[in-house]
Amino acid sequence: MRFLAICFLIILFTSVSGFCADNTDAAEPEMVITEKKVLQKGELPEEISRFHEVLNTGKLRVIGESRDGLPRYYAVSRAKLDARRRIRTDLLDFPLMGFSGIQELESRNPEFAVLFTEYLERAEPCEGTHMNFSQGDKKGYFCMEIPFEDLRKEILDHEPVPDEQKVPPFNPEADPILSDYGCIIVDTGGYSFVPAILNRVLSNTGELVWMPGEDSTTPVYTFNVTDAVSSLIGAGCRKPFTAKVKEVQRYTDAVLTYTDALEISRILAENSDAPVYFVFNYRD
């Protein structure tokens, strides 16, 4: 009898333990579990964190990571916190214009600083599979993304250009000639050009030919003129105009010859929202 009683207790304990384990797992969020330390393609969405990609896609996407050796639930929770931290730090590091970034705008404009904090709350888990746990090293991953276009408009609405960097508008003499072109390609190849929120196009006399506005479309960034032409024609542009820059100032201002600046002003006179593509030398 004593032997049977012990066996009964062992069976009962095993059943209760299994039930608790099942309920504990059910309480945790669903996630992909992998034995590999390196995520396989397709397990989580790819990051969109290089600034030209963020501008082109209109979103920032990051994957946060936890440290090794954590239980599954805590690993994923800490990875989520890391993703939120990365969204903030990545955004603050993004170039605004010249040598300044969004961080400088936040520090000198209290109203924008408040809006920026509120904007960060819009970050959400990526669509589809957004969390992952590596069983091998007990490490969590969490994917989050945030729309960038809303922030771009807020920035452009808060006097982002310091007074010392403001320039007069390009204002050529009365020009009755109409342009044959419908869109613009600014080729900065061979120069140290950096995609930024406020990439400007200047004339060789230092006047402003084009700058993105609050209501304008975001410029597109690509690595060669051929891709830019194909993309614009595919989007319905009747004839792209390509301007080769004369120089690049402060990494973000593309300077053109007077002739090219005049042609672009003609295009913009007919369509102020004409598509603008920047071709630049990509550096990882």
Image: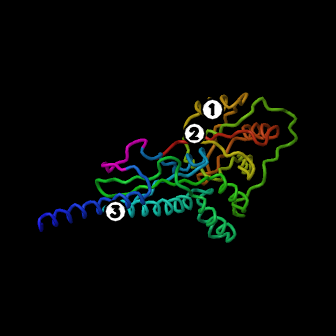
SS of the residue under disc 1: helix
Inspect the magenta stretch and tell me whether residue 10 lies in it: no
SS of the residue under disc 3: helix
The image shows residue 256, relative to residue 72, as above or below, that is above
Q: Amino acid at mark 1?
A: Ser
For residue 222, the mark is 2
Q: Amino acid at mark 2?
A: Thr
Mark 1, other Cα within 10 Å: few <14 / some 14–19 / many ≥20:
some
Quadrant placement of the N terminus: bottom left
Disc with the residue nearer the chain's start (1 vs 2): 2
Of 115 and 213, the residue lying toward us: 115
- The residues bearing labels 3 and 2 have C-alpha atoms spaced at a distance of 55 Å
Q: Specify the segment rendered in magenta.
A: 33-42
Task: From the image, tell me which residue sits under label 1.
Answer: 231
Q: Is residue 129 left or right of residue 22?
A: right
Q: Percent from the top left, x then y, of residue 176?
A: 88, 35
Residue occupying image coordinates x 45% and y 62%: 82
Q: Is residue 113 left or right of residue 126?
A: right
